């Protein structure tokens, strides 16, 4: 590990050169964000503002972080998942003077330690993917939420759900923009991004044939729909499980088979959860799974595949390939779990392609400008979850 107390902690600074090339590659495919960066390079509207970010440290996120710095902001960053940090990118950012605390394969204690380090900046803006930063501020540093932070943004569906619940309970202490709900985010990132990057993660961890396989996708929201569509493209027989009748009907009309997980568990070859809820695949499902079944998760949290249940049924676990653990069950059958049940697209691959993250992150950039603009005009926003202004979606 390379560490400069209070400034950065990354896996290995020697990876910086590699990381820089990967960031250049992403930059060349992110025209919207780079246009915004050029547009604000001179006026520096974020000068005097301090952004704490908690979002997957990938080559695309590095382009966003650098755009904030070019726009005048001070930035301190942590990853929002223990397995999603690209260590070479983190090294490049640290070497370029960005305060970053992130490495691949951290434990939960280290995960929250990294978030705490970013708060040394005393941020007045926060950027979240899953709301762990906002929750840490509200629970551990309420004075920061009340006296310092003027607003924040939230990247993902799960995080927006958490924050809406908080706002409804009157517990939200500063305004947050639901970046996830921008059409130029969810209708591209969640559908096309998750669709492609989830398959990418599975292929890198297994290199299995998709054609002809029974691919079970749990959840037919934007993400699940994207994954099922791409699996179909590979020639898979797609099966959807859904609790929401309208979503189940949509899946049926899109040509997928729809059934309960109890039935799908018996015939599935590859299982992908994308529901945002916990315990989607549990003991009774593992018990009836085929020998050699592959199980993974595309949702933000690792709560959808119940590994505690699986371990109870298991004789022996070993890593058979990177991000691929072989569970030999007491019933003699074998199940493969990818990326320890964490989001397989970022843990076993590189997350969504740059082209879709370009639009998601352009929304992040403009949402923070929108918050700063209100602040500079002396206006007070309410402590609630705001939608992205329609004009912003259109401009992007
Ligand atoms: N997410 C997926 N791919 C990503 C990438 N390449 N860089 C940063 C974050 C990335 C997570 C997003 O899809 C986020 O919008 C979400 O979780 O919804």
Image: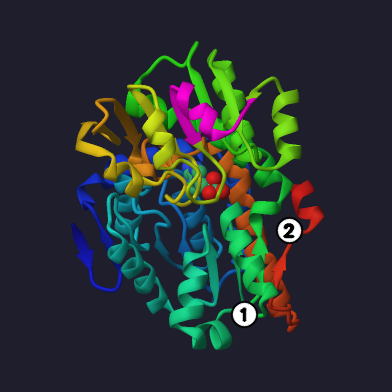
Q: Is residue 269 magenta?
A: yes
Which one is nearer the viewer's eye here, 325 or 335? 335
Q: Residues within 10 Å of mark 1 (few under 14, many from 20)?
A: some
Find the magenta span and give its range.
258-272
Label 2 beta carbon within 8 A of ligand 1: no
SS at circle 2? loop
Q: Position of residue 218 (x, y in %)?
A: 55, 36
Q: Is residue 38 visible?
A: no
State the mark number for residue 171. 1
State the mark number for residue 388. 2
* Quarter of the figure that contains the N terminus: bottom left
Nearer to us: label 1 or label 2: 1
Q: Position of residue 265 (x, y in %)?
A: 47, 29
Q: Could you tell me which residue is drawn at 56 percent across and 79 percent down? A: 149
Q: Residues within 10 Å of mark 2 (few under 14, many from 20)?
A: many
Q: Could you tell me which residue is drawn at 58 percent across and 50 percent down? A: 361
């Amino acid at each position: 590990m390379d560490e400069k107390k209070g400034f950065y902690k990354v896996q290995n600074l020697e990876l910086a050169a590699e990381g820089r090339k990967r960031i250049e590659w992403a930059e060349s495919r992110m025209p919207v964000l780079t246009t915004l960066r050029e547009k604000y390079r001179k006026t520096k509207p974020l000068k005097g503002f301090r952004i704490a970010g908690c979002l997957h440290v990938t080559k695309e996120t590095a382009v966003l972080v650098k755009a904030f710095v070019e726009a005048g902001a001070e930035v301190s960053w942590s990853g929002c998942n223990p397995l999603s940090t690209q260590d070479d990118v983190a090294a490049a950012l640290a070497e370029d003077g960005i305060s970053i605390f992130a490495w691949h394969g951290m434990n939960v204690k280290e995960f929250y330690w990294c978030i705490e380090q970013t708060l040394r900046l005393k941020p007045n803006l926060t950027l979240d993917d899953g709301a762990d930063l906002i929750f840490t501020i509200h629970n551990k540093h309420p004075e920061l939420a009340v006296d310092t932070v003027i607003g924040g943004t939230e990247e993902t569906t799960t995080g927006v759900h958490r924050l809406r619940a908080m706002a409804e309970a009157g517990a939200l202490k500063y305004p947050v923009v639901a970046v996830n709900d921008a059409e130029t985010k969810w209708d591209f990132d969640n559908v096309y991004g998750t669709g492609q990057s989830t398959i990418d993660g599975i292929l890198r961890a297994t290199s299995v044939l998709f054609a002809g396989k029974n691919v079970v996708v749990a959840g037919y929201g934007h993400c699940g729909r994207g994954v099922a569509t791409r699996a179909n493209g590979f020639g898979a027989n797609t099966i959807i499980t859904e609790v929401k009748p309208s979503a189940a009907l949509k899946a049926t009309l899109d040509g997928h088979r729809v059934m309960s997980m109890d039935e799908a568990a018996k015939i599935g070859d590859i299982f992908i959860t994308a529901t945002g809820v916990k315990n989607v695949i549990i003991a009774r499902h593992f018990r009836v799974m085929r020998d050699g079944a592959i199980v993974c998760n595309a949702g933000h949290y690792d709560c959808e595949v119940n590994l505690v249940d699986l371990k109870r049924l298991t004789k022996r676990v070993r890593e058979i390939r990177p991000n691929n653990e072989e569970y030999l069950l007491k019933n003699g059958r074998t199940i493969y779990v990818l990326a320890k049940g964490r989001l397989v697209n970022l843990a076993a691959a590189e997350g969504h392609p740059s082209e879709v993250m370009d639009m998601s992150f352009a929304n992040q950039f403009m949402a923070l400008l929108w918050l700063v603009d209100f602040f500079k005009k002396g206006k007070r926003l309410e402590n609630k979850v705001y939608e992205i202004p329609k004009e912003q979606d259109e401009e992007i």
